[in-house]
Amino acid sequence: AIGNKRIGHLNDGIDKIYTKDYQDTADSKLITARDKSPHSEDDIYTKENPYRTSTTGLYVYFTTAKAAKVTYTVSTKDTDYPDFSATPQGGNKYKTTHEFQAIGLVPGKTNTVTVTITYRNGESRTRTITKKSSKALGPEEIRLTSTKANTGQDLGNGLYAILGNDSDEQDYLFYYDTHGVLRAEIPILYYRTHRLLFKGNLMYFSVSTRDIVGMNKLGRIVKFLSTGDDYILHHDYELDADGNLVVLATDTRKKTIQDAIIKINTATGKVTLLVDMGTLYKSYRDSTTFASMSGSSSSSSDATNDKSRNYNADSTPKKKDWLHLNTIQMLNDGSVILSSRETSTAIKLDNVESNPTIDYMIGEKSFWKGSDYTSYLLTKIGNSSGTGGQHTITYQKDSRLPDGQYYLYMFDNNYGV
């Protein structure tokens, strides 16, 4: 009971974070506190997690008399945590005002952030910030256990994003470095974050089944987008050529799930239906029989109420999951490539934002035999194995291939249910 109360309290607090009023107020308070006095490189202003979107994210602000570039390194006295170095967004440009979020502080530890300031003439100087970071909100490991010896391969200096845990408790987006050390914890509303997209100095990511946000370099949420009352997102989304979101979705008014593609205008927030797969595949959809992973006897509100925090479209007994789109890849010509779990098929659609038509399918002939769609199947050359409910089709161009050719990578997790 105590644990449930704590989770409920945590959920309520995070619900407030993902509102425009909260973010505007947090920004106003931050600027007011910061601007009470000037801040040079000898009096750097810092504040931990001002927008409450990154538990150990450190807001940093100072000015320099001459234009300079900035990098930083995070270190702790604890030898379990190697140093982490980064160049903040915009830090590689010479300027006199420096404002950034230092990512990489270890939760619950005393961290030393060494800021290196480099001028045009090559002169550089360092300043240090000592900060005892807050503890992580969630139960995640601060350093992951290595199960294989280091092969010596250079993994670079990036961060691996763990895109959410879809749990019955509070959900998070995690960043781990190449040593397996937790460098950021971002609480989300619920469900999971499926993809990180970058456009116009914002990072777009989903924070629930209905909400996608745009976060700036400081951790402030400046874009609040919704799938609206009639749709919930499912698994994946991409940006089109105009910077709008193209989202795999379920139309909650229908008796089927995971079979729609919608567009969210990132400027206006307007939601439009691009593709109803049940229209393109009507005869096949109508031929399928009802099946539910949870069994038709389930009647809990979480299985039937699509507005519930714990609603899971996969296990609802009230909807037919005949296609189950789980990945979308957008091509420059306006076409998309989709992964369908229930048919074990990759589907390419042309003109998805104007007049969607089927271009081709990659799947097993035996599965589609007798349907109206066999003519769209590409011919398989060789004896590669078939798939059983695959996830994650990835489109990749390669300049070494002839014009019009590309690679498709696929994660075949043999999810044949």
Image (cartoon, helix red, strand yellow):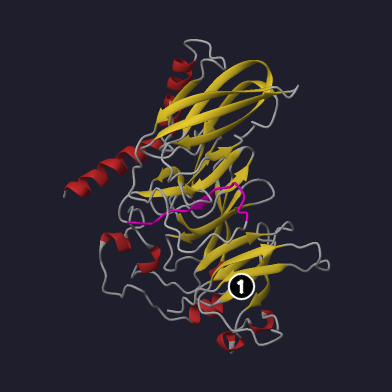
Q: Is residue 387 magenta?
A: no
397 sits left or right of 317 in the view: right
In-front residue for pair 17/336: 17
Task: Report whether residue 316 is seen.
Answer: yes
Instruction: Give the residue displayed 70% in from the left and 29% down from the top.
Output: 93
Q: Amino acid at mark 1?
A: Ala
Which residue extends farthest left?
1
Task: Report whether residue 21 is seen.
Answer: no
Q: Is residue 149 above or below residue 163?
A: below
What segment is highlighted magenta in the picture? 154-167
Residue 20 position, x and y percent, is 45, 32
- Looking at the rendering, which quadrant does residue 354 occupy? bottom right
Q: Is residue 61 above or below residue 305?
A: above
Residue 121 position, x and y percent, is 76, 21
Residue 347 position, x and y percent, is 62, 71
Instruction: Give the residue displayed 57% in from the left and 38% down from the top.
Output: 85
Residue 141 position, x and y percent, is 37, 51
Q: Is residue 156 magenta?
A: yes
254 sits left or right of 139 in the view: right
Residue designated by label 1: 346
Instruction: Give the residue displayed 55% in from the left and 79% down from the top.
Output: 387
Quarter occupied by the C terminus: bottom left
